[in-house]
């Protein structure tokens, strides 16, 4: 009899030791099943073990093995909320192109702190904080366009907001066109934007990496996001018209980023090239009035603008304070939009 092929094992931390192993396993299994697609439910087998946490006897860890493949969770909630508490807000973190869905937010220090999980779980314990995963690797053979990414995000947002743990459910409202999208727009209070290239970014080094691959499907996307892209100019105008009374916090980089360069010895592309400003101030800011858009410079480069090692870093304290303000102000503002 052939041995069963082993599957990838994920470590789920931060589980409360006050609950029994059986209860935690049941809740975790139910949460996983709720987020699996229909075909994944048929082909995946989930094995789980509850084990002690070596550093804190108030927490325990779950080792979760998936056999038959890896689930494609598009939204992942980063920390557990107490079931008897009201969720005050939903926070959704979206990586930029070519960013790792989890690693992008991890600090560079030895502890590898992921601030959305390790810091916000203490500072905003009543917020449901999620990360969103999509096929953003520029080296992959995806044919996704900016429009495709937008449609996928909207579809997944509709699914996430159709749960009983949502602050404001996606209800049908009076707008004749795209009522669900209009509902999502009403439920959005504010955004923290870290080095977003509204007017495009330098992609010369990425294009060199794909050089010799004229038919590479990512060339279309690179043209859409390059500096002074006509498509981005039109989308930026539409975006500004949609903002209205939403609060915007724009963080922009004042450090330069090394470009990709091919290393002949290792036969790999590395960040050892010239220093360039990946996303200039003019591209990172919407140039809206200060009452709508707060503009915050960070002395970091484009690769580490969202990486915070400690809770005392200026970037994190600013982000935390803005989110706390959002948490206080959003509920009555959002509620009023739905019942005007």
Image: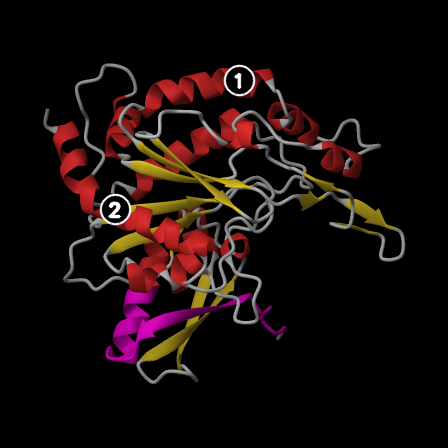
Q: Quadrant of residue 289?
A: top left
Numbered mark located on residue 320 in the image: none
Residue at x 40%, y 64% (from the top left corner): 118
Position of residue 159 measured from the top left corner of the image (x, y, whole percent): 32, 40
Q: How is the image coloured?
A: secondary structure
Q: Secondary structure at mark 2?
A: helix
Question: In the rendered image, is residue 168 in sight?
Answer: no
- The image shows residue 193 at horizontal and vertical percentages of 44, 39
Q: Position of residue 246 (x, y in %)?
A: 29, 30
Extreme residue in the left direction: 339
Residue assigned mark 2 = 325
Q: Earlier in the sequence, mark 2 or mark 1?
A: 1
Q: Secondary structure at mark 1?
A: helix
Q: Nearer the viewer, residue 71 or 312?
A: 312
Category of crowding for the residue at label 2, using alpha-carbon neighbours closer than 10 angstroms: few (below 14), some (14–19), many (at least 20): few
Return the residue nearer the eye: 89 or 243: 243
Task: Classify mark 1: residues with Cα within 10 Å, few (<14), some (14-19) or many (20+).
Answer: some
The residue that appears at 55% across and 25% down in the rendered structure is 199
Which segment did they paint magenta? 2-28
Disc marking residue 233: 1
């Amino acid at each position: 009899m052939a041995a069963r092929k082993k599957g990838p094992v994920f470590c789920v931390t931060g589980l409360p030791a006050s609950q029994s192993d059986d209860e935690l396993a049941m809740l975790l299994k139910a949460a996983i099943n709720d987020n699996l697609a229909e075909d994944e439910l048929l082909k995946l087998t989930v094995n789980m073990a509850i084990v002690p946490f070596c550093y804190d006897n108030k927490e325990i860890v779950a080792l979760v093995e998936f056999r038959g493949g890896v689930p494609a969770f598009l939204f992942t909630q980063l920390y557990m909320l107490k079931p008897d508490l009201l969720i005050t807000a939903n926070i959704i973190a979206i990586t930029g192109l070519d960013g790792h869905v989890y690693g992008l937010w991890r600090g560079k220090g030895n502890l590898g702190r992921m601030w959305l999980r390790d810091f916000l779980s203490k500072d905003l314990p009543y917020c449901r904080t999620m990360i969103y995963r999509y096929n953003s690797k520029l080296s992959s053979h995806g044919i996704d366009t900016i429009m495709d990414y937008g449609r996928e995000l909207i579809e997944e947002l509709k699914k996430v907001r159709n749960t009983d743990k949502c602050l404001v459910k996606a209800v049908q409202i009076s707008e004749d066109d795209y009522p669900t999208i209009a509902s999502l727009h009403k439920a959005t209070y504010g955004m923290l934007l870290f080095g977003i290239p509204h007017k495009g970014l330098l992609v010369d080094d990425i294009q060199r990496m794909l050089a010799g691959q004229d038919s590479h499907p990512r060339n279309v996307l690179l043209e859409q996001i390059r500096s002074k892209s006509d498509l981005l100019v039109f989308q930026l105008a539409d975006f500004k018209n949609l903002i209205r009374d939403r609060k915007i916090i724009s963080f922009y980089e004042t450090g330069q980023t090394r470009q990709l360069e091919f290393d002949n010895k290792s036969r790999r592309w590395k960040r050892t090239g010239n220093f360039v400003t990946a996303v200039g101030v003019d591209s990172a800011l919407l140039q809206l009035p200060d009452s709508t858009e707060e503009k915050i410079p960070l002395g970091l480069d484009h690769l580490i603008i969202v990486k915070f090692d400690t809770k005392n870093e200026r970037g994190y304290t600013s982000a935390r304070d803005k989110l706390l303000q959002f948490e206080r102000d959003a509920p009555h503002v959002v509620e009023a939009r739905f019942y005007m």
